[in-house]
Amino acid sequence: MSSVNLVAREVAVKIVFYGPGLSGKTTSLRKVYETVRPAHRGEMMSIATEGDRTLFFDFLPVKVERVNDCTVRLALYTVPGQVFYNATRKLVLQGADGVVFVADSQPEMVDANRESLANLEENLLEQGVRLERFPLVFQWNKRDLAKALPVPDLRAALNPRNVPDFETEALSGRGVLDALKAITRLVIQDLRIKRIVPPTRPMTPAVPTIGAPKSGGSGLEAQLSNLANRTGPVSAPPAGGSTAAPVPAVPRPSRSMPAIVPQQPASPIAPPSLTGQRPLGPTSALAPSDLFDHARAAEGAFASGDYATCIQACLDAARRGLAFAGEGPVGAQAHLLHVDGGDLLKLQTLAARSSGRVDDAAFALYVVMQIFTRLHAAGLPAPATE
Ligand SMILES: Nc1nc2c(ncn2[C@@H]2O[C@H](COP(=O)(O)OP(=O)(O)OP(=O)(O)O)[C@@H](O)[C@H]2O)c(=O)[nH]1
Ligand SMILES: [Mg+2]
């Protein structure tokens, strides 16, 4: 869901990396994280992973300055590709402005690619959005594998609309930033057509428009390219395997997270609006407005490395969240909301300890997000009536 701050001339857009399980969505996002200079991005958050598998989502904020006289803030998300996580995919997809579809080039993945694309179409339609009119680009990923299908075959199977597509190797990063540039350009064009992006100021004739970026100028292409960390170019040649530095599933929190704050925490699952002074993480993005402050407290403690406080704040938020399901024992509330009782028990055990570890705190945030997600699905808390 895009948001525009006309005073600051900032546009915040949400882009989702979609595709079947293990196609390379998380690896692609990680490569964007590694490529973009720290001053232009926040920390990458991987919320609940099991080995390679994303269980909830990954999130990375990126800032692109001076596009069409505006600053563009990208909120990049990945979905979990495994078929049975469709409820989570729907949540992450809500309010998306564009999608990078990461297809797996291997022959045995043709059906999984097709099913995932059909699933994207169906989930968008539930939001009243038609895929054929939606900003979309493809990554034909894993091109480094010898058995990768020819690109024309992939196009015929998945891209009859002939939207921009890119051969990528997420492990080395080849092509990943090109796909991101393309989807950002499409999204901004779409927002301009919808008159959401403000027109260029008349007094700044030197600033090129999105549709006609000038080479070496301050157009979107140039700006995104300029973000690249010179010590780790995205187009580094593949070296017969992974060249990516190992990144922990739960990255170490940074005190230098970018300014990300919602203008109004009105919708419980609104994507983060990216203006303001303090960081907004995925937990507060999912929080019902009554619990927004609790989520922020938990995230603040996490960001400052105070994991024990984060876990306590999560337990508090979890209890308050469960209370929306009515009075009674926590177990019954959890049952009503279909929240995993085992996870709650573990959260209570962690909170009883005096110290906290980063992975425990990340788990606590995950439990709270699980509760927020279920509350939303159940329509709780009910909106206030006049
Ligand atoms: N050879 C090769 N392997 C890749 C490439 N991209 C990703 N992989 C590998 O594919 C596996 C899955 O990658 P992920 O990025 O975790 O996949 P995902 O799409 O996020 O998977 P889910 O979270 O389950 O949806 C990992 O072992 C990656 O190292 C690529 O371009 N080439
Ligand atoms: Mg993943």
Image: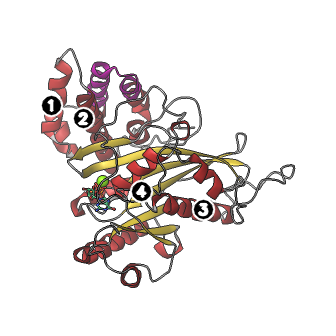
Q: Do the residues labelled 2 and 4 touch (CB within 8 Å)?
A: no
- Report the Cα–Cα distance between label 4 and label 1: 37 Å
Residue behind mark 2: 363
Disc with the residue nearer the chain's start (3 vs 4):
4
Q: What element carries label 2?
A: helix
Residue behind mark 3: 185
Percent x, y for residue 295? Answer: 38, 31
Mark 2 or mark 1, whichever is nearer to me: 2
Q: Residues within 10 Å of mark 1 (few under 14, many from 20)?
A: some
Q: Are marks 2 and 3 in contact (CB under 8 Å)?
A: no
Mark 2 or mark 4, whichever is nearer to me: 4
Q: What amino acid type is highlighted by mark number 4?
A: Gly
Q: Can you say whether 361 is above or below 211 in the image?
A: above
| Magenta stretch prevailing secondary structure | helix
Q: In which quarter of the image is residue 10?
A: top right
Which residue range is magenta in the image?
Answer: 298-320
Disc with the residue nearer the chain's start (2 vs 1):
1
Q: Answer with left or right where residue 307 lies relative to residue 330.
A: right
